[in-house]
Amino acid sequence: MASNIEKIVEQFKIEGTYKEAAIFGDGLINTTYKVKTVEEDQPNYLLQIINHHIFKNVPELTKNIQRVTNHLRQKLEQIEGSDLKREVLTPIDTKDGNGFIKDEEGNYWRMFLFIENTRSYNQLSNSNQAFVGGKAFGQFQSRLADLSGGPLYPVLPDFHNTEMRILNFIERVKQNPVDRLKEVQEEVDFLMARSEEYKKVVQMGREGLIPERIVHQDTKFNNVLLDENDEILCVIDLDTVMPGYVCYDIGDAIRNGANTGLEDDRNLDNVSMNIELFEGFIKGFLQETKDVLTPAEIDTLAFGAKLLTYEQAVRFLDDYIDGDNYYKVNAPDHNLVRTRAQIKLLKSMEEQYDQMEAIVKKYAAN
Ligand code: ADP
Ligand code: GN1
Ligand code: MG
């Protein structure tokens, strides 16, 4: 693999000499390496194999990321003291000018400048981090609001279309391709009992009650790089940046970040929604966005947290019933463990929903 990686890296316009590469980070979709260069004064790089089973149109995906990062860089140029190599991802050009490499095995590779001395957390430890997370994704949305050049390419059409996800899920349950249904009837029933409720946002969009905006759509807290003082440095993982609804971003950030347990916690006693962390996310997000959001959009924010948790439970269970073809798994029941943790989290949100709505009203009014 190492010599293969060196050959891949040689096809990019890097500064410095390749030294070594090692697997890096813990994303569930792409395979990521940190590439070090020999020279102390040259940058290191982040190399990724793009999961092209999921992202089928790599040229359009690459164009989206170039457009988004160029736009964010232009915004930063107007802000005094910005560090253009650390506050936005820098994609590295290939020598043939494509922005990605396709190897003989059909893998697609891309590179970014590695941003050194950052922090990225899978779990939050205080509400200031939640505030920073909310602010980071709010700022990301507002900086992209005036992206020119037409809509971004829908790399994953219907990514958060819960209505569509539910229809696919019903079909998967019918097919029961690897005979796992008998183990998960309780979870299927729990999710199906709520299916009408969670079609709401897509329906509101279709009726023109909420606008589409450019949103990130994968707002896990480990997709924000922080500096040594836990301040926002850079929003990463731009594969899913596409038109969508505003509640997707804050909703998924809360789903991921306000959980007192892990996304795949086997001990469900650990899993619940921490209302202080919820408040931190809402406060940070609304600080950046409340002047542009419509009242109808603001009304979807607390719901968005439940929606994205519900949808994630459907997605994990769908993949479990399908025999684990989408998410990386570390055990045969990993997707089921994840499903149960999401269901537990959703129950906790349902119990605290009145309070969640009151918090949104408070920060929308401030
Ligand atoms: P995935 O889609 O698989 O989640 P990411 O693009 O989020 O992949 O990258 C995986 C991890 O690598 C991130 O969580 C982060 O910790 C780290 N990372 C990604 N891009 C950079 C970068 N440019 N500089 C430093 N670390 C990075
Ligand atoms: C995936 O790529 P990563 O690990 O940040 C997934 C998200 C899920 C998340 C669950 C393209 O995110 O939608 O919410 O796992 N990304 C894609 O952990 O499907
Ligand atoms: Mg990621």
Image (tube, helix red, strand yellow):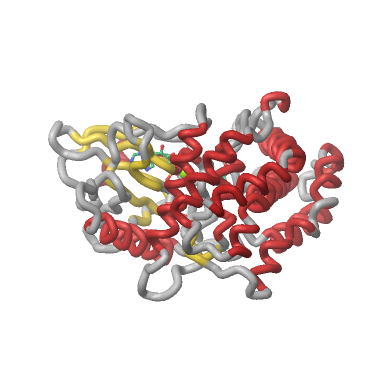
Specify whether residue 277 is in view.
Answer: yes
Q: Is residue 215 above or below residue 302?
A: below
Q: Is residue 76 above or below residue 178?
A: below
**Which residue is depicted at the point 77% across and 45% down?**
178
Quadrant containing the N terminus is top left
**Horizontal relation, residue 311 to residue 8: left or right:** right
Specify whether residue 315 is in view.
Answer: no
**Horizontal relation, residue 204 to residue 141: left or right:** right
Between 314 and 31, the one lying in front of the other is 314
- The percent coordinates of residue 107 (x first, y second) are 42, 52
**Which residue is depicted at the point 55% across and 37% down?**
257
Between 82 and 94, the one lying in front of the other is 82
Between 334 and 140, the one lying in front of the other is 140
Q: Is residue 332 above or below residue 321?
A: above
**Horizontal relation, residue 218 to residue 232: left or right:** right
- The percent coordinates of residue 317 (x first, y second) are 72, 44
